[in-house]
Amino acid sequence: MKIFFLLQLVCIGMLAANERDLSFSLKGSFTTGTRFLYNIDRPDSYGEQRMLSSNVGYGMDVRWNMVWDRFFLGFSVEKIGAHEMVPVYYMQSDIPIPFDEGYELTAMELSGYYVVPISSESIKFYLGGGFGTYDGDRNFSIAKIKAATVSTVTYIGIHVMTGIDYQLFSRIGVRFEIKFRDPHFDVTTKFDQRSAEYQGKLIQLPQGEYVTKINLFGVNYAGGLFVTL
């Protein structure tokens, strides 16, 4: 329902824009930090955490003029993910067992952009902000056995940003953007089997359901190409 509501707002905006400037962009992104908070439903063990620093993504957005020349309304979709494997001597094993941790996030955001007066025809500086929905999943495995996802909780949050558009040609340009936001989502996982065999060893897997909060608290840097239609 939340995604459907966002798409409705986009369609209304595009109809209102009529023949005004419309731009489409493709981008790559890098987020400086993501925090995993484990067992948030268990006060006795809450506090364990892990950090991932290589969070890369890709996405697209659509922007169009609304009301006057310096204001744009936009809708963006972005996929972000990270992955890290750490060998751990687990359950008194005499060999390192691979603990594989990662996530995938889909961000859908509705934003407003204001082009600051110091801009020119070829270079536009802008400020912006808005809200979005952030839906994700945790990818976790021990000894190459993946935990199953029981449930996820979607987060709704706000963001602010600043960026620059540089017009290379009449309809093609490059865009660089810095975005500040704090999306998180909760994932409940469990292992469907009790043990796994790894390098001839029988490895016991954790039992029961575990709730993990995944928080993309770092700054989001993005860059790409845009086309004005």
Image: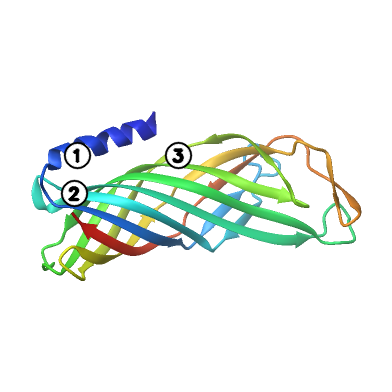
The answer to which quarter of the image holds residue 220 is bottom left
| Residue under pointer 2 | 64
Q: Residues within 10 Å of mark 2 (few under 14, many from 20)?
A: many
Question: Considering only order in the chain, which callout, 2 or 1, is on the residue closer to the N terminus?
Answer: 1
In the picture, the disc for residue 75 is: none
* Colouring chosen for the image of the structure: rainbow
- The C terminus - image quarter: bottom left
Residue pictured at 61% horizontal, 53% vertical: 102
- How far apart are labels 3 and 1 at the CA level? 24 Å
* Callout 2: SS: strand
- How far apart are labels 1 and 2 at the CA level? 8 Å
Left or right: residue 200 versus residue 183 is: right
- How far apart are labels 3 and 2 at the CA level? 26 Å
Q: Position of residue 142 (x, y in %)?
A: 75, 50
Q: Which amino acid, mark 3?
A: Tyr
Q: Is residue 48 above or below residue 195?
A: below
In the picture, the disc for residue 155 is: 3
Q: Position of residue 36 (x, y in %)?
A: 59, 51
* Callout 3: SS: strand
Q: Which amino acid, mark 2?
A: Trp
Left or right: residue 57 versus residue 141 is: left
Question: Considering only order in the chain, which callout, 1 or 3, is on the residue closer to the N terminus?
Answer: 1
Q: Position of residue 56 (x, y in %)?
A: 48, 60
Left or right: residue 29 versus residue 148 is: left
Q: Which amino acid, mark 1?
A: Gly
| Residue under pointer 1 | 13
Q: Residues within 10 Å of mark 1 (few under 14, many from 20)?
A: some
Residue found at the very far left of the displayed protein: 68
Task: Verify CB contact (< 8 Å) between mark 1 and mark 2.
Answer: yes
Q: Is residue 45 above or below residue 228?
A: above
Residue pictured at 45% horizontal, 51% vertical: 79
